[in-house]
Image (cartoon, grey):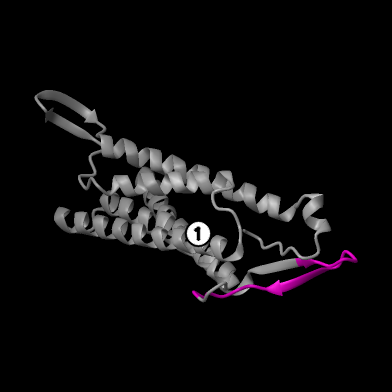
Amino acid sequence: MLAGMQGGDGLLVSAAAPLLTFLLVFVWMAFVMTSYTVQPDGTIVATPQAGFSWGYKSDLVFNWHPVLMSFGFLFCSSQAILVFVTKPFAHITNKLIHVACHSVSILSVTVGTIAIFRYHNEHGFHNLRSVHSWVGLTTLIAFGAQQLSFNASCDLTGTLHGANVSSYMASDCVLGSITAVSIALLFVALLLVVWVSKHPVEETIANSDIKIPFLK
């Protein structure tokens, strides 16, 4: 009974944590996001940058990126996985929900990627200049490649291609595991970006024309 309770608690945390993370990121970008301008006298002026826009050269285009990435990679992907763990419906229904969640996830992270490239291009910033960018791009490519297989074969037992297999992990499942590790590395890189943005180098502080957003 205790094991069952622990399992239920684990599923609850697994379902709630991605949603909570997405909501926190959404609130951050929609209501809290702020940029900082260093004046010649050393005074730091805070300028609200919260909200969303798709307008040309709008600073608010950036805010779509973390929101859509957290929604796609964290929330949608976690629900796609959990539907096979909880098995709330018939197998074919669960499989359709799984595919739908992954499809929405791909759409979300694709638009989020377009948003950050557009923001960089319109504001004169270089693309792919950080570890965060490269890990994120690698994750996106791996995630998209995983969508080419829908059999979710992570524990096959039987005869496969004339050979007996037991608890066999298929190639698409291996790719999914690599994607999960890449997502973890992505968030490590995200933490590094936040740290650097909060502790800018002296050359950046000396330039009074530079805005220092929390996540550029």
Q: Secondary structure at mark 1?
A: helix
Q: Is residue 81 left or right of residue 216?
A: left
Q: Is residue 177 magenta?
A: no
Q: Is residue 70 above or below residue 10?
A: below
Question: Residue 123: x percent and y percent?
Answer: 60, 65
Question: Residue 9: x percent and y percent?
Answer: 41, 52
Q: Residue at x 38, y 46 (%)?
A: 141
Q: Is residue 214 left or right of residue 18?
A: right
Q: Residue at x 33, y 38 (%)?
A: 175
Q: Residue at x 36, y 54 (%)?
A: 77
Prevalent SS, magenta region? loop
The residue that disc 1 covers is 117
- Tell which of 57 and 152 is nearer to you: 57
Dot 1: few (<14), some (14–19), or many (≥20) neighbours within 10 Å?
Answer: some
Q: Is residue 212 above or below residue 161?
A: below
Question: Residue 138: x percent and y percent?
Answer: 44, 44
Assign the C terminus to one quadrant of the image: bottom right
Q: Is residue 65 left or right of residue 164?
A: right
Give the extent of the magenta segment.
37-54
